[in-house]
Amino acid sequence: MSYPARRMRRLRRTPALRRMVAETALRPADLVAPLFVRDGIDEPEPIASLPGVLQHTVASLVLEAKHLATLGVPAVMVFGVPATKDAAGSGASDADGIAQVALRALRDALGDALVLVADLCLCEYTDHGHCGLVDAAGGIDNDATLERYAEVALAQAAAGADIVAPSGMMDGQVGAIRAALEGGGLAGTAILAYAAKYASSFYGPFREAVDVTIAGGGDRRGYQQDPANLREALAEVRLDVAEGADLVMVKPALPYLDVLAAVRAEVDVPVAAYHVSGEYAMLAAAAERGWIDRSAAALEVVGSIKRAGADVVLTYLAGELAELLDPVRG
Ligand code: PBG
């Protein structure tokens, strides 16, 4: 009689055995909830392509943030949706712009109980929908945009952001923001760099959430990364760390788990991954049709992002997962 060399199944027999030998575990503390706050509305509004996610009023945003904090979610990422847009994206750096109003309200209500991350970009605030300033020839003016990002960073930090998160993929954005924060007496504000951000087809629902249409049917391929490239992501990450990034991000998450693992191996700063709107929408749509089990799929997907190397996962599933992640049942 011959036996298998090693019986892998012995340690899979009971839930307690499986828990004991689990190599990774998802915790509420790993999660960041992206939240939308919209100027000029009296009631929170649903977002059709992101079922379960809302455009908040400042008041409902604060309530949601308090709820997330009680669930053990350590951080939120704030996106502002302004009432009016213009070519320079003025609202992004206005002290009374919606994101700044929201950050102050969150800080007042929650003190240091929740980490406040501010997405730093112009696209929610520009009438042309680009992440940077458009020049006379219709191109994106990189260096003029850096000056705007510096102004936005100062406004967000002054309003209470612990972390600013530049997402526009302009060259030199982290260095420009770091210098502005130091010069503005806000050296304690950290930078989460959207370092490897791809020109992805998974941002569609987000653009509905922030009311963005790119002028003339344009796209962001002139500044976001080509999905074909991995070495380029590592170069972006190295540059951002050299420029002073405190954390770096890979975005989207699931289609780029190889990039995430490579970034994790490359740097020693914390690595974040953004499970983006289209990734959430796919999961929500399949679950709505009864084709997959929503909770099980959510745990598996976000768990896989952690296993691939993320220290922090930004996900619209944050609150739901924190409720599912009972520390006893694990
Ligand atoms: C803005 C920004 C985008 C996302 C986060 N910040 C959209 C884009 O680059 O078009 C996408 C987030 C998501 O899809 O959930 N620069």
Image: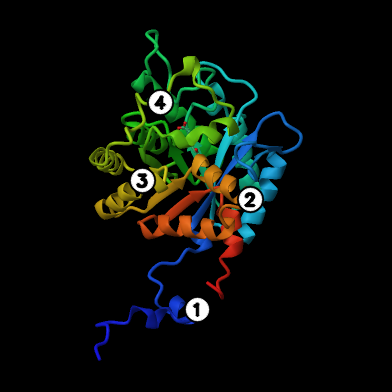
Contact (Cβ within 8 Å) of mark 2 with mark 4: no
- Report the front residue among 216 and 248: 216
Query: Residue tagged by mark 4?
Result: 220
Horizontal and vertical percent position of residue 286 = 57, 48
Dot in front, 4 or 1: 1
Q: Kindly state the secondary structure of the residue where label 4 is placed.
A: loop
Q: Is 107 placed left or right of 179 in the picture?
A: right
Measure the alpha-carbon separation of dots 4 and 1.
46 Å
For marks 1 and 3, the one nearer the N-term is 1
- Give the number of the mark in front: 3 or 4: 3
Dot 2, how many residues are within 10 Å of its Cα: few (below 14), some (14-19), or many (20+)? many
Q: Which residue is mark 3?
A: 256
Query: Would you say the beta carbon of the disc 2 residue lies within 8 angstroms of ligand 1?
Result: no
Of tags 2 and 1, the one toward the viewer is 1
Mark 1 highlights which residue? 15
Image point (42%, 15%), residue name: 134
**How dense is the environment of label 1, judged by Cα within 10 Å: few (below 14), some, or many (20 and up)?**
few
